[in-house]
Image: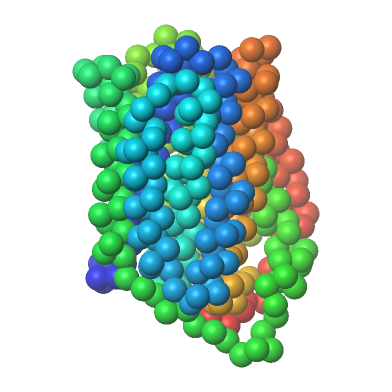
């Protein structure tokens, strides 16, 4: 399914945006560990990327919906993220300095994604599943950097991390300038208001499921690489294990049009949560077993790719066109923002007492609750005209 020009621009943005994630996710914790921060400080500094998602997506989404334009915000916030890192984050390695710098960086860095998601969902609305063919380029970017980053760290050392981050932020800004403006279609005034839609039972259940999945991922993004290092894995192997997860994610994103023709979004959401129970349970059970490590990473196909595609599809179905950016913002706030922050911070408190077993056991319990909530409360709502 070839991509026409606007979608190619969004695919390039996803590639660069998640290439940054491919560096930050697997290796930023190791970089902070090399600076001799303790587990709580590491969890706080990493949680800043998720804490920013509590404030930024709602703010920028509201502004975009109000102005009827997304492109200027995508470009300006990408530039500001680059400048903040270049001017501030490259200098100083104390906890207080990095706290302030990273808080500012992520306030701007997290702004663009919900706006890009809303635009891509709108452009692909006529062909369910096509969104995933665009989003898959983010997974490809993530995988390339996750693999390559491990070898670069072994070659140049972990101290090269800030320079690599700076280069990737520069790439994000460059591609943000190519992203087109996607007009926001306004339906009749009689359409249900944003707050009324948000209070509907299935919508609340959806965002609760997203919260619980992201809560489970909090320990993963904070301590998975550190746990692997403690189990004896090298930096290059750690990079490959992260890449296994992304490879499975890419496969699912590519075949998502077929998957969505066979299964409802509600069933896909349930399957993703059950996959999360299995994945985090395997990590807690024996992270040092290479076979189980590969198997648990393969389940990323369910608990990230399927979960994310189902979430985007349900949000696009439930909310009116003029509410899409705010709805995507609420999704990021509830999941990566509140959920990811809470899970990561709690993991920082628990890690010294129970390590991998306790923190990832908590993750498995969180998604198990999510599966029960989804099974009972996520029911189809009438689609809003798009």
Q: Taking 67 as reference, is 368 above or below it?
A: above
Q: Residue at x 52, y 61 (%)?
A: 60
On screen, residue 11 versus residue 219, left or right, reads left
Total marks drawn?
Answer: 0
On screen, residue 264 versus residue 349, left or right, reads left
Q: Nearer the viewer, residue 210 or 300?
A: 210
Q: Residue at x 48, y 66 (%)?
A: 118
Residue 258 at least partly seen: no
Q: Nearer the viewer, residue 72 or 16?
A: 72
Q: Residue at x 56, y 48 (%)?
A: 53
User: What coloring was used for the rendering?
Assistant: rainbow
Q: Nearer the viewer, residue 381 or 187?
A: 187
On screen, residue 174 versus residue 308, left or right, reads left
On screen, residue 112 versus residue 196, left or right, reads left
Residue 2 coordinates in the image, percent (x, y):
25, 67
Q: Residue at x 65, y 42 (%)?
A: 339
Q: Residue furthest left?
A: 155
Q: Taking 23 as reference, is 41 above or below it?
A: above
Q: Quadrant of the N terminus?
A: bottom left
Q: Taking 67 as reference, is 15 above or below it?
A: above
Residue 164 coordinates in the image, percent (x, y):
28, 33
Residue 17 at least partly seen: yes
Residue 301 coordinates in the image, percent (x, y):
47, 43
Residue 6 coordinates in the image, percent (x, y):
29, 70
């Amino acid at each position: 399914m070839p991509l026409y020009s606007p979608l190619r621009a969004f695919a390039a943005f996803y590639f660069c945006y998640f290439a940054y994630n491919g560096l930050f996710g697997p290796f930023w914790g190791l970089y902070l560990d090399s600076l001799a921060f303790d587990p709580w400080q590491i969890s706080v500094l990493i949680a800043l990327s998720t804490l920013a998602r509590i404030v930024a997506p709602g703010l920028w989404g509201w502004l975009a919906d109000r102005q009827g334009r997304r492109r200027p915000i995508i470009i300006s916030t990408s530039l500001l993220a680059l400048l903040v890192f270049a001017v501030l984050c490259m200098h100083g390695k104390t906890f207080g300095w990095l706290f302030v710098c990273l808080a500012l960086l992520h306030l701007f860095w997290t702004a663009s994604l919900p706006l890009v998601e809303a635009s891509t969902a709108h452009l692909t609305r006529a062909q369910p599943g096509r969104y995933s063919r665009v989003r898959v380029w983010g997974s490809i970017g993530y995988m390339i950097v996750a693999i390559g980053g491990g070898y670069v760290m072994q070659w140049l050392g972990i101290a090269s991390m800030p320079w690599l981050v700076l280069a990737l932020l520069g790439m994000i800004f460059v591609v943000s300038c190519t992203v087109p403006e996607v007009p926001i279609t306004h339906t009749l005034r009689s359409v249900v208001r944003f707050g009324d839609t948000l209070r509907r039972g299935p919508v609340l259940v959806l965002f609760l499921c997203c919260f619980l999945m992201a809560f489970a991922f909090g320990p993963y993004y904070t301590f998975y690489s550190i746990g692997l290092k403690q189990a004896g894995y090298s930096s290059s192997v750690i990079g490959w294990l992260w890449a296994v997860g992304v490879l499975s994610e890419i496969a699912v994103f590519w075949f998502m049009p077929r998957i969505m023709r066979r299964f409802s979004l509600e069933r896909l959401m349930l399957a993703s949560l059950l996959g999360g129970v299995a994945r985090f349970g395997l990590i807690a059970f024996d992270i040092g077993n290479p076979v189980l490590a590969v198997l648990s990473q393969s389940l990323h196909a369910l608990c990230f790719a399927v979960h994310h595609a189902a979430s985007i599809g349900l949000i696009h179905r439930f909310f009116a066109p003029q509410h899409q950016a705010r709805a995507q913002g609420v999704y990021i706030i509830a999941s990566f923002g509140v959920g990811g922050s809470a899970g990561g911070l709690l993991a920082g408190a628990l890690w010294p007492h129970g390590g991998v077993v306790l923190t990832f056991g908590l993750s498995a319990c969180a998604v198990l609750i999510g599966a029960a909530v989804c099974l009972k409360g996520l029911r189809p709502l009438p689609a809003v005209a798009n």
